[in-house]
Image (tube, grey):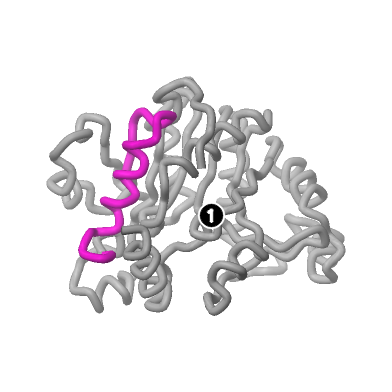
Amino acid sequence: MTVPQGEAGRFTALIMAGSRPGGDPMARAAGVSHKCLLPVDGTPMIRRVVSALLAAPSIGRILISIDAPDLLAAEFSGPGADRIGFLPSADTPSLSALAAVETATGGAGGAGPMLITTADHPLLEPAWVERFCREAEASGADIVAGLAPAEVIRAAFPESRRTYLRFRDGHFSGCNLFALLRPEGTKAIRLWRRVEKDRKRPWRIAKALGLPMLLGYLAGRLTLDAALARLSRLAGAKAAVVVLPVAEAAVDVDKPEDLVLVETILRGRA
């Protein structure tokens, strides 16, 4: 996939690499302290994510949010190390993202746009990053999420189990790619924080999102555009999506069968 290049190094990339409370079962099974160090075809998967970002022209600085920053400092001492920084993660993903944004921008939102991804995305490719960044900026939104169409994923990996967002005009899976383009985009992260805090009290989430929206979604009547409009109003920030027609963009490593699939894809690439 070839895409036009934007301003080189314009985006700061944030990799979310913090551990869940109690650790990760796949990390324990592999004998590593953190999931981001899980070997994927012989290489810690966070190295694969960092390599893809270093090779993407739109990415300048790379920040890694993890609960043990010193652990990774020794992992990245070769070419490109001067572009990589480490931040202590917070108690939850939303708080970690907010803390990273504050660090990157000095609290003023003046450091340019940010790309946010996760350490368990070892299939990440520079071409996807470039296309996502370019189309996210062209959207005119404050915050943008990457989605892959269900029909593309099912055609490529018919036996893979994925979680889909089911809208009237299409089903999609997340790509673990987000762009924070303007300071107003942090309002959407704060909405995520509200939902995260109430994850064990679904009635509060329903109240925040609005019953008509939830009922419409459950009934299969809600369109993607209507959902984005509602979320934009709730957050006070314009939200948009970039649809990436690439099945691998929706494949992360959450369970053992994901690891088998990812390693199979990587060997096919080789």
Above or below, 213 against 107 in this view is below
- Does the rendering let one see residue 109? no
Nearest to the observer: residue 253 or residue 267 = 267
Position of the C terminus by quadrant = bottom left
Answer left or right for 173 relative to 208.
left
Residue 252: % across, % down: 44, 62
Answer left or right for 252 relative to 229.
left
Q: Which residue is mark 1?
A: 175
Residue 100: % across, % down: 40, 38
Magenta span has 58? Answer: yes
- Residue under the point 62% across and 31% down: 184
Span shown in magenta: 40-64
Above or below, 68 against 267 in this view is above
- Residue under the point 43% across and 26% down: 105
Number of numbered discs overlaid on the protein picture: 1
Residue 79: % across, % down: 18, 35
| Label 1, residues with CA under 10 Å away: few <14, some 14-19, many ≥20 | many
Nearest to the observer: residue 213 or residue 77 = 77
Image-quadrant location for residue 206: bottom right
Which kind of residue does numbered mark 1 sit on? Cys
Residue 78: % across, % down: 14, 38
Answer left or right for 126 relative to 213.
left
Nearest to the observer: residue 263 or residue 168 = 263
- Does the rendering let one see residue 263? yes
Q: Secondary structure at mark 1?
A: strand
- Residue under the point 61% across and 61% down: 173
- Residue under the point 43% across and 32% down: 102
Magenta span has 209? Answer: no
